[in-house]
Image (cartoon, rainbow, N blue to C red):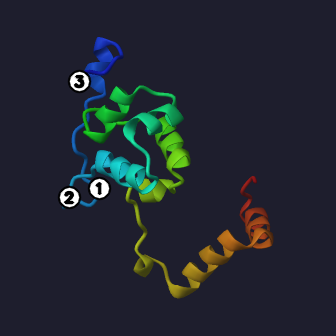
Amino acid sequence: MECAESRACRRSCRIDRVSINDSQPFDIGAQIVKYRRIASLNQRELAEKLGISPSRLFNWENNRHAPSVEHVAKICAALDVAPDELLNIHIKQETLSKKELAIVQNYRRKAEVRKAVDILLGVEP
């Protein structure tokens, strides 16, 4: 199946199997299928939720084309999955000290901690 977009898009949206960890190529299609099945949705149902054609979803799931960043966000919302899970990106805990991990966990859990840290670091809410 071909992309329904322009000829230039058909050339540019073909994806190479990108390697994230230098040992295995990343397969976004398999990840979409995995989480679609967990959500008990068929391709047509997910395509409707995303506002796209089933053939476009088929192309993503078969790695013929890659979804845009905007579509990745929509996929995450529709399947109720975090982007790092969908994209299979995991920070190894050993890269963070126990203290750093505790700080990150508290930051995520406690609104007052987030507010204080954001103020101290000059991060806008």
Percent coordinates x, y for residue 9 in the rendering: 32, 19
Which circle marks residue 24 in the picture? 2
How far is mark 2 from mark 3, CA to CA? 26 Å
User: x, y percentage for residue 123?
Assistant: 72, 57
Farthest residue toward the left?
23
Q: Distance between the residues labelled 1 and 3?
A: 27 Å
Instruction: Indicate which disc, 1 or 3, sits on the residue closer to the N terminus.
Output: 3
Nearer to us: label 1 or label 3 = 3
Report the residue marked by disc 1: 20
Q: In which quarter of the image is residue 17?
A: top left
Q: Is residue 83 left or right of residue 55?
A: right
Q: Residue at x 27, y 52 (%)?
A: 26
Tell me the amino acid under the disc marked 3. Answer: Met
Residue placed most toward the observer, 119 or 15: 15
Residue depth check, mark 2 versus mark 3: number of the one nearer the observer? 3
Question: What residue is shown at x 74% (from left), y 59% (from top)?
Answer: 122
Q: Residue sitting at 34 percent across and 17 percent down?
A: 4
Q: At x 56% / y 80%, what residue is drawn?
A: 100
- The quarter in which the N terminus is drawn is top left
